[in-house]
Image (spheres, helix red, strand yellow):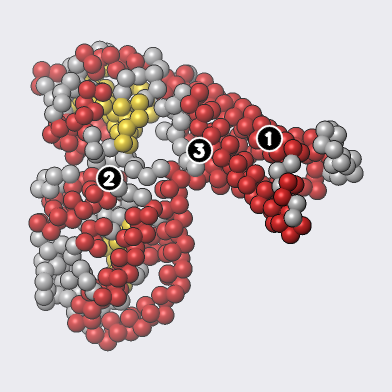
Amino acid sequence: MLARKLAKYLLLIADFAAINVALAILFWLHYRSGWFTGMQNLGRSYLDFAQLGLLVSIVWLLYFFFRGLYRDWSLHSRAVHVALVSRDITLFCLFLLAVIAGSYALEAWKEMRFLDIFTARRFMTVMVYWLVFLVLINAFRLVALSAIRALLVRGRGMDRLLILGATEAGKNIHHAIASAPELGWKAAGFVEQNPIFKGAEFDGLPVLGKYSDLPHLIILHRVGGLIISHESSSHNEILRVLSYVAEFQLTVFIVPDLYDAATGHFKTNTVHGIALKELFPEHMPAWEANLKRLLDLSVSAVSLIFTFPLMLIIAVLIRLDSRGPVLYSQERVGQYGRIFLLYKLRTMRTDAEAGGPQWASQNDPRITRLGRFLRKTRLDEIPQLWNVLVGDMSLVGPRPEREHFINQLRNEVPLYLQRLKMKPGLTGWAQVKHHYDKNIEDVKTKVLFDLWYFENMSLPLDIVILLRTVWVVFTGKGAH
C-alpha cells in the first residue's frame, strides 16, 4: 500500500516537473531559437510567464486527474502505460488545436479569410507542442515508475495477499507472485477449507485458516488482496468467499477458469505477466468517479446554503410538535464497513427505540405528526447533505444501514454485503423505485435494485436518479 500511494504522489510531481520543463523548452523555441519566423524576442524573460505556466500546469494536472491517470499502474506494463498516457496527451492537444482554430475562425469569418484558419505555421506550432509534452511527460513518468519498481524489487512497500486454495494452481500462483515483485504483492499465506491442512504449511507458507476466518485474517495480517485459486466453476463458492470480505477494501483476483462463474458481477483486467483476472469493485471509470465526487461537493454545498432557511423553519416546527432535539444522529455503516455518524431531522419520539433497533412500519405510532410529512417528502434527510459534503456519503448510492441490521441481514439476504462496495447515498435507485424498509422482503427487493445500480453505475444514471428524487420530494410518490 505504501508503494502504491507513493507512486501516485511521484506521478503528480513528475507531471508537474515535466509540464514546466516543457513550457520552458517551448518558450526557448518560440522566443530564442529563431525557428519560428517573426517570433524571436530576446527581451522577453520566462519569469514573465511564471503565472501563466502555473495556470497551464494546473489545467494539465486537472485533466490528468479526471482522465484517471493517477490510478494504480502496478498491473500494467510500461508499454501500456505509455500508450494510455500518450492517448490522453494527444486528445488534449487536439482539443487545444480546435480551440485555436476556433478563435482564428471567428476572425477569418469577419474578414472572409477562410484559408488562414489552418496555416502551416499554426499546424507546426501545435505539432511541436504535442511532441514536447508527449516526450517529456512520458519520460518523467517512466522515471517515477522505475523508482517505485526498484523499491518493490527490494521488497519494500509491498501489499500482502492471501491465496485461497492449497492446490497446484495456488502453488503456481505463489511462485509467479514471488518472481514478480514489481507487481507489489507478497503472499502472507494460504486459506484452505480442507481440514487436513489445518495448522500445516503448503509450499513454504502457513495455511492460516478457512473461509470463515477471512475477516480475522485480513485484519491480523493487514491484507490488501486475495487470489481465489480453487479449480472450481462453482458460482456459489465464489459468492461465499465474497460474502466474508465484502466490507473490506480489497483487490480480488481469480484464476481464468473461474472467470465465467463471476461474469456479470465484476469488470476484469488481466494482471500483467501472470495468468489472473482482477475483479474490480468499481464500475465507473476514474474520470467519471472524480466527476461524481465533484458533483457531490458542488450540489451538497449549494443545497446546504439554500435549504438553511427551510431547516430553521422545520426546526421550529419540530420543537412545537414534540419534545426532544431537532437533529437526530445515528451510527451507520459506510463504504467498506467504515462507521460514520448520519444526521437527520427527528421524525420519531425520543423513546422510539427504547426496546432496541427495529424497522419502521406503516402507520408506525412512534412517528410524530410532523415526522410523517417530513418522511413522505424526504425533507428529514436534508442534514445528510453534510455527510455528502465531508465524503461519508454520495448523492446517489445505496442507503447506509445500521450495524445491528447488517449483522442480521448478511446471513439472510444473498449478496447483501456487496452494497458495502459502494459509497452510501442520500438517494438511490432503490429509493426512487421502492419505499422505506418495513420487513426482510423489502430489504431483499432493495438489494436487487442496489445491485442493478452497482452494475450500471454512471454519471448519467446518477442525474436520472437525482431528477426522479426531486419528483418524489414534490409528489411524495414512492416514499410511503
Residue 453 visible to the viewer: yes
Q: CA distance from mark 2 to mark 1?
A: 41 Å
Is residue 458 depicted above or below 195 in this figure? below
Residue at x-position 26% and y-position 57%: 429
Pointer 2 and pointer 3: residues touching (CB < 8 Å)? no
Between disc 3 and disc 1, the foreground one is 1
Number of other residues with Cα within 10 Å of mark 1, as a class: few under 14, some 14 to 19, many 20 or more: some
Q: What's under tag 3, amino acid-wise?
A: Leu
Task: Farthest residue to the right: give it.
Answer: 43
Between disc 2 and disc 3, the foreground one is 2
Q: For residue 69, which numbered disc appears in the image?
A: 3
Which element type, helix, strand or loop, lies under badge 1?
Answer: helix
Which element type, helix, strand or loop, lies under badge 2?
Answer: helix
Quarter of the figure with the N terminus: top left
Between disc 2 and disc 1, the foreground one is 1
Which residue matches tag 2? 455
Q: CA distance from mark 2 to mark 3?
A: 23 Å
Where is residue 8 drawn, in percent x and y?
Answer: 51, 36
Q: CA distance from mark 3 to mark 1?
A: 23 Å
Which residue matches tag 1? 127
Number of other residues with Cα within 10 Å of mark 2, as a class: few under 14, some 14 to 19, many 20 or more: some
Number of other residues with Cα within 10 Å of mark 3, as a class: few under 14, some 14 to 19, many 20 or more: many
The total of numbered circles placed on residues is: 3
Where is residue 263 drawn, in percent x and y?
Answer: 23, 34
Q: Earlier in the sequence, mark 2 or mark 1?
A: 1
Q: Earlier in the sequence, mark 2 or mark 3?
A: 3
Where is residue 264 drawn, in percent x and y?
Answer: 23, 38
Residue at x-position 34% and y-position 65%: 467
Q: Earlier in the sequence, mark 3 or mark 1?
A: 3
